[in-house]
Image (spheres, rainbow, N blue to C red):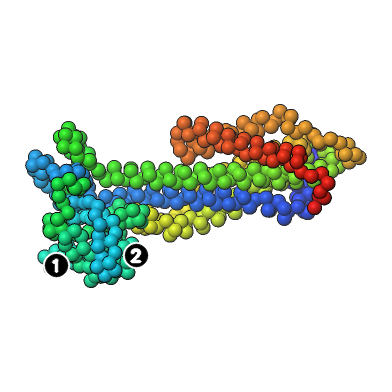
Amino acid sequence: MSNQKTSYRWLLRMAWRDSRRSRGRLLLFISSIVIGIAALVAIQSFGENLQTDIDREAQTLLGADLALEINQPPSDSLRQWMSDLGGEQANTISFVSMAYFPKTNNTRLSSIQALVGDYPFYGELTTEPAGAAQRFRSYRDGQFALVDQSLMQQYGLNPGDSVKIGQLTFQIAGSLLSAPGRTGLNAAIAPVIYIPQQWLGATQLVQRGSRIEYTYFFRFDQQKNVDQLLEDNDKMLRAERVDKETVEDRKQSIGNALGNFTTFLNLVAFVALLLGCIGVASAVHIYIKEKVATVAILRCLGASGRQAFLIYLIQVSIMGLLGTLIGLLAGSLLQLLIPKIMADFLPVQQISTDISWKAIVQGLLTGVGISILFTLLPLLRVRRTSPLRTLRVVGNEKTERDPLRWLIYALITLFVALFTYWQTESWENTLAFPLGLGIALGLLALVAQGFIWLLRRFFPRQWSYV
């Protein structure tokens, strides 16, 4: 160890030699790190790809350039204003009602959409069979309806069967597989049934006191500034109690909702990683206790406490890095499955599965950083291991009094806070999440200490160890 370069080489060689009999156990330590990092990378990659797809398909999610919604029949002045807007127009009259299926004699609460016009202007009503949407629009050829796929499957319906809505019976033109902005969650609450608006009056469901929403869709040429149009007429729209939604509004609302969801999943995965690292720290604590005699021998041979500490820090750091790399690979593969699992709950039909290098870097820094920080606590006792341990057993070192432990606690807290801010970009959450996590872990520690006290206090001493 004549120079610093030789010293580092010696530390690496000693760390490798010392790990020969314990590599299997060290590999077992990293399993929880692998799971946590895989979850983080998969969720982060999925979230970024989903946001990119939402930005790309924003017009398809709304199906129009502008949507105006009102919960009462529009006034004559509002009708005239909308008519003067020009462009392509369509509208729906929607309400919730019971649908009756004569084939199976079942009824189901459904969202009835009475449509007129060629909506959606972007995207399409995806149906089975493929020509069902066109047949549905040909209302002059008969009374046709498009029924949500979930209803078709639930009651064993086929195209050509009938559905009765109010006082009118419609022939099912086909099953509706997808429509702009609708997800499997919408279908679970109130599956949609499209009917031509021309037949709505015959159902006798639109009466005084009915809760009905009127939605008007517009498609303009690219020269029309929709935002400026809404700003110029904001006072009138407010007076008429009209809710307005543009492509940017729909993109932002869906993006925020899904962003909050992926952020929540990321924090859950991070908590799982933290709990896993606590388990790793406990395992390293036991591992170091078994290595005390080895450390004492190294001290007798001239190694300093710092060098002994670095030997075992190198071991756990390599294990943390290895676990993180395996987790990155597993997460990259796992994110290929998430779109298939959640396909029914997403508004976008095709989710890309590109590798997110931002998620890779985040996972690498998080995995290596948090695994090293948590294993530093049990490694502190190595610094104060006395060479006398080779000759006799002495009392346990008071590693809990080592002043460095407070620095490690502070670094762990700072790391958790930085990760929280990275995910939420909110200072309130940055303060609240580590605080709540600390309280939860503190309560768990108190419960554990309580169990230990109860066992020592009431466990029968005459019982054998095994």
Q: Residue at x 49, y 38 (%)?
A: 422
Q: CA distance from mark 2 to mark 1?
A: 25 Å
Expressed as whole percent of the image width and height from the top left, the position of residue 110 reads 27, 56
Q: Which mark is residue 142?
A: 1
Q: Earlier in the sequence, mark 2 or mark 1?
A: 1
In this picture, is 344 found above or below 55? Answer: below
**Dot 1, crowdedness within 10 Å: few (<14), some or many (≥20)?**
few
In this picture, is 237 found above or below 169? Answer: above
Q: Are marks 2 and 1 in contact (CB under 8 Å)?
A: no
Q: Residue at x 33, y 43 (%)?
A: 253
Question: What secondary structure is found at the residue carrying circle 1?
Answer: loop
Between tags 2 and 1, which lies in front?
A: 2
Question: What secondary structure is found at the residue carrying circle 2?
Answer: helix
Residue type marked 2:
Gln
From this viewpoint, which residue is outermost toward the right?
Answer: 391
Tell me the residue that label 2 is attached to.
154
